[in-house]
Amino acid sequence: MATFTGQPNTNDNFVGTDDDDIFIFNVSDLNARDIVSGGGGFNALRLSGSGTLSAAQLSRVSGIDKIVMETPGLVLTIPQTMISTIWKPGYGLQITGSSGNDYVDGRALFTGRYLDVTAGNGLDVFLGGGSADAFRFRAEDLDGDTVNGGSHVSGDDILYITTPGTVSASAFANVSNISKIVLAEGTNSLTLGNYAASGLNIVGANGNDHIDASQADVTSLSITAGGGVDSLIGVNGINIFTLVDLNGDTVVGGSGNRDEIILRTQGVTTAADMAYVRGIEKFTLANGTNLFILADTLAVGLGGKSITVVGGTRNDTIDGSAMSDAVNLTIDAGTGNDVIKGGAGDDIITVTSDGRDSIDGGAGVDRLKLDGTQSAPPLDVLTNVSAVENITIYGGKLINLYNTMWNGISAARITISSSGIVDGSSLTADHAVEFMVYADSIVRGGAGADIFRIGSGYSSTDPIANISGGGGADTIYVATVGATLDMSNLANVRGVETFILARGDNHITLDDAIFRDVAGRQITFAGNDGNDFIDASALSSYNSIQVTSHIGLDTLIGGAGNDIFHFMAEKLDGDTVIGNGGYDTLSIGTAGTVTAEEIRNVSGVERIMLAAGQNSIALTDANIVGLANSRVEIWGQAGSDNVDASALSRAYGIDTRSGGGNDSLTGGAGTDIFRFNIADLNSSDSVSGGGWADQLILSGGGSLSTNALSGVRGVETIILWGGPAQITLADSLFRDIGGRRITIQGSSNADRIDGSSLSAGHSILAVGGNDIDQIIGGADHDRIQGGVGADILTGGGGRDQFVWSNAGEGGDSILDFVIGQDQLLFNPAAFGVNGAALDVRSTDVAGDLSKTDLLVYDGILDDGAAVRSLLGGNDSTVDAGLFVVARDADNHSVLYYTASADGSGGDTGVHMIADLGAIAPASLGVSDFLIG
């Protein structure tokens, strides 16, 4: 070790030893002509006096590791040549200030070695260079000093506070370009004021530190606290607080939404421990076993609406159940078997699949991200998962779903996204899943109504994922625009009842294989904007499709089953619909006008369903060609419908069902059917049968006046269905009737058919049902058949015929039978008489009645037993059909029929046919009967 002392007015040339040397100069004696070479060791330059040492004066000084400013007021400018010759690798130039106002200028320094300046008392000026410089102050000495860290490429310009104490905001008034502040051990109070920097790192030590950066203009702040109960207030930018633990510390983030607390030690952190934490968006736990309980007070001061918690590598418990819906939690559980509890917000939970984590999403719409890319997860990895509405599974591993996952969920479905194997086959009907699937996915739904979404990245040449819908009404959503689906890419799809198509020109071709496990053997397709083509022509009769068309010119081809095609009236304009076999339906979902031109390409459809409201539809033969019964059904609903089939030829017809409203129904040249509820038909309805034999079918019970039928014309048959009904006929019904006769068919209940107001030339063929009917003819030649039941029949004027198909239809009363004008007509197959005609009349009770057709008895016969008793004494030897007429106690002529003229048929073998009123039995002749 050597000591060298500079001499005044001398050009010194000092070369140090290999030890730690000292060079002593008065600043007035050191100039550019002096040569100082420190040599090896840690060498010091001790300066005294006053004045300035420029870079030029120090240009020939080298190998110096430390400068000691022994007297105040010195001004030093450090040249690069001086700092680049420091002996120890990686060390900087140490400068120790005096007790006065020191000035050190290192701005000429570029990258390489750094300055390490220790301040004394006084108002110092320290200017750093291009490296990561260090400036050391005692807490009480930094107050008005100028410190500029300079500019550097890497590392930090560091301000060291070497003693505990208070550093106020005013102390930083002239501090700039400092990126790191290191506090001393003990209790510190540091207020940055309006200090400005892009980034700042503050490192505390053991002790209760107070750091306030709330007024600082710092974009990103990092505070690393030591032990103790600290108070840390961040900037209005990004804050990262690293703490040993949280145990009553005050930590306040800024107004941004990227503030974080990093805990360095494992353990328990309760809500009480975080009572003074505000505005922190992220918590990162230490590796180890942690219990971390969040409090709703953490929502105060948040820049956004989310808090993130990152777990460690062991078994953590992260409990956010106390959080309200004001905050959404994002929890990354890390590895280990963790226990995670979400809050009332929409939480996101990420776990690895190496364990069996217990996860309760809490209220809100929560998401679970399961990372199975690193290791194969257990099949039961989701056993302890509940109250999570959305699950994303990364990695192509097999994972089972459980009913318990729906605990705490109010939504109808859980959404699961996976490119692997997800098995929900054990799920019950009230636990449905919405699957996000990819080309490699294998997913199995349960008994609920599951949804499978095919991503937009699907190519029409790729097979769709392996999908098994399971029970319930399941749906596939195809997001690909203009998808092409056929059995080459649908081969692995089964048990799916509905396909929802994306926009574009979709092309779908089906066969029976797609119906494996499909409930009801029907699949629904919902189209979108575009020209869709759906071909189900290969389907068997036990499979069918239901298609909802949208905007575009679609082509829909049904199969052999009962297919349904849905259109809006305004969108049906030239679309092609071919029903093919089965009972097919075209359902028009909106009210409007559909012209014959707009449905020119609709064929093979047995039924057209109109929407509620006012509709108008026109039909042509092209719509009916190929139908099994050559007739199309038109079903109306509430509203005034106009159905025009006038263009139909004789080979085709319509079968319309009115749904209420004032309808206008026009048939064509064929046999048409018009159906009304009897309560809905009124004078505002218009029914025009057109040509051929048309029918009006009236269902339900009630009364129908002549006025209600005033709009009906050209209908040859009226059928009552259900009943009991009362119908009054008028001459207006006979408009456009070629044969001038209308058939009225009664219901199975007690009907009243009244044609009494009909004039001559207008006749009816009235047939009652299975109850006690009342039928009244008009002025013309009517044909009246009461049917089963004790009917009351009135022929009215004209030559009327009263008809019985079999003896079981007897028991009737004819109120106005006219001998020689009206006739009693019987079915020869049911009423066997001697010979082909009823032509043998007798009054001989004792003779052989097997040759007699009509026995006229002048006495009184009250019932069938009396008739059988009477017949028992005749000479008949074989059974033969016989009509018997006799008086009853009321002096009415009563007509009986028995198939056993010898009386051998028993009492039940004698049938009372009709009470003919007050006419004398003797006046009834064979001409009043007709067999045929």
Image (tube, grey):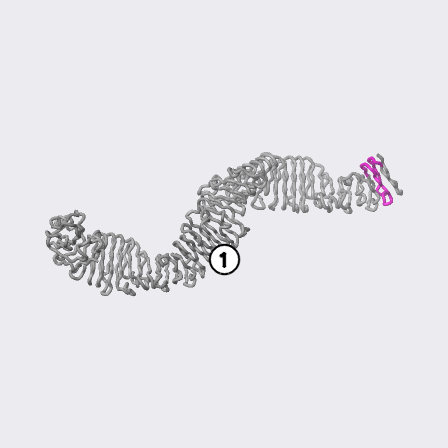
Secondary element type, mark 1: loop
Q: Quadrant of residue 605?
A: bottom left
The crowding category of the residue bearing disc 1, from other C-alpha atoms within 10 Å (few below 14, some 14 to 19, many at least 20), is: some
Q: Outermost residue, right direction?
A: 10
In the rendered image, residue 766, in percent from the top left (x then y), is placed at 24, 58
- Quadrant in the picture for the N terminus: top right
In the rendered image, residue 300, in percent from the top left (x then y), is placed at 57, 43
In the rendered image, residue 406, in percent from the top left (x then y), is placed at 48, 41
In the rendered image, residue 879, in percent from the top left (x then y), is placed at 16, 50
Question: Is 586 on the left-hand or right-hand side of 262?
Answer: left
The answer to whether any part of residue 99 appears in the image is no
Q: Quadrant of residue 157?
A: top right
- Quadrant in the picture for the C terminus: bottom left
Q: Quadrant of residue 200?
A: top right
Q: Which residue is mark 1?
A: 530
Depth order, front residue of 659/862: 862
Question: Is 163 on the left-hand or right-hand side of 718?
Answer: right
Q: Which amino acid type is shown beneath numbered disc 1?
A: Gly
Question: Is 656 on the left-hand or right-hand side of 794?
Answer: right
Q: Which residues are magenta?
A: 17-44
Depth order, front residue of 844/174: 844
Question: Is 625 on the left-hand or right-hand side of 151?
Answer: left
The answer to whether any part of residue 856 appears in the image is yes
